[in-house]
Amino acid sequence: MMDAHQLIVCRCEEVSLAELLETAEAYQCSARELKLRTRAGMGCCGGRTCRMLVDQVIEQATGHSPSHTIPLGYQPPVRPISFQTLGGRNR
Amino acid sequence: MNQRIVHHPVLGSLDAGKSLHFRFNGTTYPAYEGETIAAALLASGVRTLRVHEEKGTPRGIYCNIGHCYECRVTVDGVPTVRACMTLVQDGMEVTAGVVLPTPLKKGGHSQ
């Protein structure tokens, strides 16, 4: 496998696999806490690219599959939307 | 440079539409009507569409289906426009994302 320090999981916030694994190992936390600690999943795309991988890192580190009691939430807006668009600009 | 696939074994021949021009970071590039910004730039050999806001590492087309936002650019002053989903219009002014200041971060910069 590629070096985990070189392997980017969250491209928006540029969080590497190594960073995620180290954080998950150290804190034995939920996926949501991992997100808040590393910012993985908090970028422009709204976590749609790396969410599953963040869940899998937690599963690997803690042995618990994500329970979704403390989920990596799916919530609106589904896409990043500007206030200009909300205000009626049509692009 | 023109890297368009003009004859494709499955898709057939490229029926190029109207010829357009747009600007990316001040340089004028050609495009055909119906091409996305990302496709037109790729055909001209431009692969880097922005740099990461904090780390400055290059970014370009990643998913090309509008999911990942990696190719986001500023179009006519509107930020966070997906280059892979936006059709080129004649005279469009496209600019790449740049490194943003991080004055509150340890070791950050204000420029």
Image: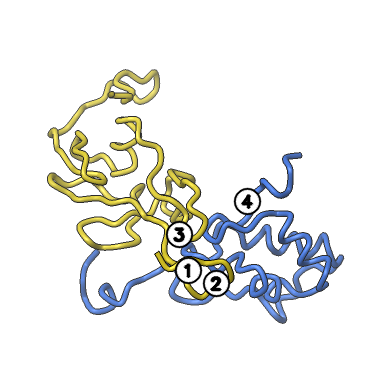
| Vertical arrangement, residue B74 with respect to residue B10, above or below | below
In front of the other: A2 or B16: A2
User: Label 2 is found on which chain of the structure?
Assistant: B
User: Disc 3 marks which residue?
Assistant: B53
Are the residues flagged by discs 2 and 3 from a single subunit?
A: yes
Which chain wears yellow?
B
In front of the other: B58 or B87: B58
User: Disc 1 marks which residue?
Assistant: B102
Quadrant position of residue B44: top left
Q: Amino acid at mark 4?
A: Ile
Are the two marked residues, 2 and 1, in contact with CB atoms closer than 8 angstroms? Answer: yes
| Vertical arrangement, residue B1 with respect to residue A61, above or below | above
The Cα–Cα distance between marks 4 and 1, rounded to whole angstroms, is 21 Å
User: Label 1 is found on which chain of the structure?
Assistant: B
User: Disc 4 marks which residue?
Assistant: A8
Are the residues flagged by discs 1 and 3 from a single subunit?
A: yes
- Give the residue drawn at x 38%, y 46%: B49
User: Disc 2 marks which residue?
Assistant: B105
Q: Residues within 10 Å of mark 4 (few under 14, many from 20)?
A: some
For discs 2 and 3, the disc positioned in front in the rendered view: 2
Q: Identify the hue of chain A.
A: blue
Please give left or right for residue B92 compared with residue B63 in the image: left
Please give left or right for residue B108 compared with residue A23 in the image: left
For discs 4 and 2, the disc positioned in front in the rendered view: 2
Q: Position of residue B73 (x, y in %)?
A: 33, 54
